[in-house]
Amino acid sequence: MFSLKGRVAVVTGGSSGLGVQMAKGFAGQGADLVIMARRLDKLEKVAEEIRSLGVKCLPVQCDVTNTDQVNKAAEAAIKEYGKVDILVNCAGSAKNAGVLNMTDEEWDFTVDTDMTSVFKVTRAFAKYMVEKKYGRIINIASMYGLVGNTAIDTVAYHSSKGGVVNFTRAVAAELAKYNITCNAICPGYFATELTIDTLKTEAFTNYMKATVPMGRYGKEGELNPAAIFLASDEASYVTGAILTVDGGYTAV
Ligand code: NDP
């Protein structure tokens, strides 16, 4: 079960963090890859590592907030492989502030990067899945898309990730007739470029220990089984699901 041999998987945010981990996880299951992000030097390095696992990997420089670049990235993927089976919307970033202090610029940046980009990338790639009557779309939301939090004010991030959660359900309903599934993963705290400065502080570590039943951060690779499952042929009747991988944070 869960072989991805012969499948083509696109991962946005493929230059660092969870995107790299999932891309390598898919490669380990035999999938060929397209990895997208803005930093081409990093993408090329990751692509080399993925190729060493015995699969193909196409790095595509792309700002996922830019419609034209996103559409061109989809065309490049189709030119290379002729199809796209799996799409993981993982690219993300955030400007953190609370509702009382957040500027329009901070709000727009976060919503554009974390939510509108998911729409743009899905629109660009899903049309090719429709042609083949096969697709697995996986949106990386966040446990912060399901709840608020008391550790750090980040209202636009919560709002965007909540939007991604319900975007997932809407797309699942709309595209089911084309044999395309759409699911979301809501990660908890994983140490990456995005989070390390916050997570490593003593104050946040204490907060985590008090709020995460498992009492620890997620480890490298611990998101991969969820992504591989949702990307697999075997998950053919799973759509519109919101899967938390958060050490139990949202269970309490
Ligand atoms: P990283 O900062 O390590 O990775 C973010 C990735 O997104 C990078 O590859 C970055 O590439 C890419 N990216 C950011 N903005 C853009 C853009 N405008 N266009 C294209 N690519 C972009 O963070 P994580 O791996 O932690 O985050 C990955 C996803 O997981 C995000 O959506 C995040 O919200 C989510 N998440 C993370 C959690 C965590 O604890 N780490 C918890 C819950 C959710 P580049 O800069 O090269 O463009």
Image: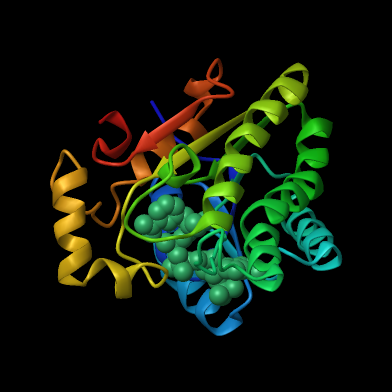
Please tell me which residue lies in front, 230 or 55. 230
Q: How is the image coloured?
A: rainbow
Identify the image quadrant of the C terminus: top left
Task: Measuring from the top left, give residue 73's x and y in whole percent.
Answer: 76, 62
In the displayed structure, 5 sits above or below 58; it is: above
The image quadrant of residue 79 is: bottom right
Task: Measuring from the top left, give residue 162's x and y in whole percent.
Answer: 57, 41
In the displayed structure, 97 sits above or below 114; it is: below
In the displayed structure, 78 sits above or below 106; it is: above
Q: How many marks?
A: 0
Please give the name of the residue rendered at 52% of the width and 36% of the height, measured from the top-left corner: 184
Q: Is residue 16 visible?
A: no
The image quadrant of residue 214 is: top left
Q: Is residue 119 left or right of residue 243?
A: right
Please give the name of the residue rendered at 31% of the width and 75% of the height, measured from the top-left corner: 197
Please tell me which residue lies in front, 57 or 103. 103
Task: Measuring from the top left, give residue 13's x and y in whole percent.
Answer: 55, 63
Identify the image quadrant of the N terminus: top left
Q: Is residue 34 left or right of residue 66?
A: left
In the displayed structure, 55 sits above or below 159; it is: below
> Which residue is at the far bottom?
41
